[in-house]
Amino acid sequence: MTPRRTRAAVVGIGFAGSQHVEALRRIGDVDVVAVVAATTELAARAARTLRVDHATDDYREVVEDPSVDVVHVCTPNYLHVEVATAALRAGKHVLCEKPLATDTASAEEVARLAASSDRVTVLGHNYRFFPMVAELRARVLDGELGALHAIHGHYLQDWLLLASDTNWRIDPGQGGASRAIADIGTHWVDLAETVTGRRLEAVLADTTTLHRQRRSFRHAETFRDDGAGDALVDVSTEDQAAMLLRFAGGLRGALTVSQVSAGHRNDLEIRVDAATASATWRQERPDELWIGHRDSPNETILRSAGAGAPATRALARLPGGHNEGWADALRGLIASAYQVIRGEIPRDECPVPLPTFDDGVRHLRFVEAALESARRGTWVTVDEIARRTVAGQPKEAMR
């Protein structure tokens, strides 16, 4: 008998949701059976565009459908916990975009539910699944570069450079009290922790809000101007941040994030300094890994199918010279998740570790620590945020 195809529903069908649909189709043995959007009109339009049979504006309809196996949560941030919780209670596997929640306490609640279930839960950190990130991770963890002493880099964008640029993320009610740090800073920190094997412990942050007012928005989609209204709304979330970081084992770091840097479309760069060599990877040049030496020529390692560390080979699908980028990394993440969901491999045999809801909790603690540090002008530890949550003061750092 032919095995039953896995059936997925995608809740939230903006930039991230549409990319999830495309990635699922590239896996080849998954049926996207429904999409959910904020309104019936938006859902129907997305279903037509993406060739999905069923569209609805009520996520409960697909969560409660017994034929749906996996729910992809790609909504605005404030709905992540609500939808993921409902899906888990209905017995669904869940892939949730990051950040997991808008505050640590809510993230902890859904992470506890995930841990108590037998369902597979995955957070949407696709950058781990670039082949050359896997190569960098392997070289660092194998000690090829020598003992680490620093990690630094940036994540720069320009899609909110102008005061006329807008998006639902500028509203703390939908995106949370942090924007640039929560939206792109967590991607960089997750990558840093994955590459080095070191957990972030403390942060010293300085934040800036370039535009204190922006245009109002209705359903402004990320990276696209939908012609939102001309009325102005106040903005409290940060446009950019500079951070000093401390990781386990005394590893020092520095990170700049910005959504207002002209000409930088999606410029994520991570640089590792170690005793005998340094290494740099840039998302906008995804198939290259630069290795720096002091007493010999520097190298640029190019991705090629069949070459590199085992994880690199597992993730590389195209011949050398055929670039694998953001959408390919998302496909790698989702494909690995579905292999685990279908029981084809155990979770610990994925090419690189699948991001967990517990990772999402830790990242929210980093976000809260960064905001608190910016207000106080002092170092704030991730453990301090964790202790506060346990003590029953979960949202103080986010006010």
Image (cartoon, rainbow, N blue to C red):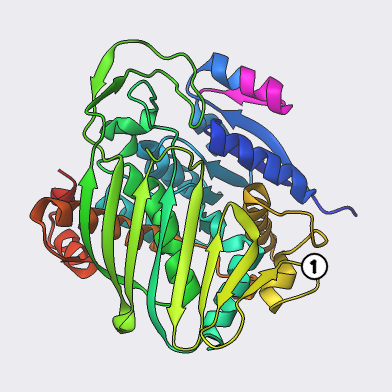
User: Is 4 left, or right, of 329 in this rendering?
Assistant: right
Image point (32%, 31%), residue name: 170
Query: Quarter holding the C terminus?
Result: top left
Query: Quarter holding the N terminus?
Result: bottom right
Q: Residue furthest left?
A: 376
Q: Picture coordinates of residue 38 (x, y %)?
A: 47, 23
Depth check: give the residue in front, 6 or 78. Answer: 78
Rendered position, 209 above or below 107 = above
Depth check: give the residue in front, 352 or 48. Answer: 352
The residue under label 1 is: 305
Q: Picture coordinates of residue 208 (x, y %)?
A: 23, 42
Among the 4 quarters of the image, the one containing residue 283: bottom right
In what element is the residue under mark 1?
loop
Q: Picture coordinates of residue 230 (x, y %)?
A: 34, 10
Among the 4 quarters of the image, the one containing residue 346: bottom right
Does 161 appear in magenta?
Answer: no
User: Is 1 left, or right, of 117 in this rendering?
Assistant: right
Rendered position, 294 above or below 28 = below
Depth check: give the residue in front, 28 or 188. Answer: 188
Q: Amino acid at mark 1?
A: Ala
Rendered position, 301 above or below 28 = below
User: Is 91 left, or right, of 248 in this rendering?
Assistant: right
Depth check: give the residue in front, 41 or 4. Answer: 41
Does 54 appear in magenta?
Answer: yes
Q: Residue furthest right?
A: 1
Image point (77%, 67%), residue name: 304
Q: Picture coordinates of residue 204 (x, y %)?
A: 20, 62
Q: Give the magenta-colored segment's residue range.
A: 45-57
Among the 4 quarters of the image, the one containing residue 249: bottom left
